[in-house]
Image: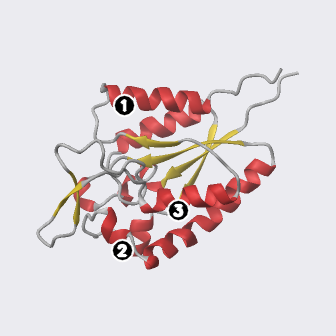
Amino acid sequence: MSKKDKKIILIAQCLINPYCRVHILGQNFQLSQELTSYLMRRRVGIIQYPCPETTAMGLQRNPQGRQQYDSVFFRNHCKDLLKIPMLMAREFIKNKYRLTCFIGLENSPTCGIHWGKHKVNRYQTESPNPVDSPDPDEPVLKGIMAEILEEELTKENIKVPFLEFPTQSEPSSEKRKKFWEVLDQSVAPPPPVA
């Protein structure tokens, strides 16, 4: 008798609700529909946390770099926002659901997975624009919320892949194709135990 594979995913809110994105970046409902349709077809339940940037600074905020969000106040705000989603994840896991992965947003200072070197603006603070030719030896950090989420999952001894939706890549790009391949692997049923 086969055991039903019940799956859930943790996801950044702007991938489900594009209105949360910084106003000048625009809203990409087509991308949200593509992602949610994929998850629904594969019967993956979605747990999203409230957007930390929107809940801290509102909808009419200006785009910023990771440096501006890296404060004890914003980190504490992120921890507060994760309390309920983490309780939900624990409850699902306790009831034999499988947390498959986390999906963040490319080039997000809060929910990105690969935040590298960024240009400096006229105020000498980090801008949201990556440098044109990054140094491969430059450290790559997670966004503030993604970093805190990883810490919270580690406390619970939960290890899942952290994926980053390549929103700035064309749908036919290799980067986008690779994302779908890795997501397919994450949500695929685990191999049978011998």
The amino acid on which the numbered mark 3 sits, given as a three-letter code, is: Ile
Q: Which residue is tagged 1? A: 176
User: Which numbered disc, 2 or 3, marks the residue that appears first in the sequence?
Assistant: 2
Q: Which residue is tagged 2? A: 57
Q: Residues within 10 Å of mark 3 (few under 14, many from 20)?
A: some
User: Which numbered disc, 2 or 1, marks the residue that appears first in the sequence?
Assistant: 2
Displayed quadrant of residue 152: bottom right
The percent coordinates of residue 75 (x first, y second) are: 48, 72
Q: Nearer the viewer, mark 2 or mark 3?
A: 3
Q: From what the image shows, is residue 157 above or below residue 59?
A: above
The percent coordinates of residue 81 (x first, y second) are: 55, 68
The amino acid on which the numbered mark 1 sits, given as a three-letter code, is: Arg
Which residue is at a point 58% across and 60% down the rendered structure image?
A: 151
**132 lies left or right of 104:** left
Displayed quadrant of residue 99: top right
As drawn, the residue found furthest toward the front would be 137
User: Which numbered disc, 3 or 1, marks the residue that appears first in the sequence?
Assistant: 3
Q: Which residue is tagged 3? A: 148
Q: How many marks?
A: 3
Which residue is at a point 44% across and 62% down the rendered structure image?
A: 144
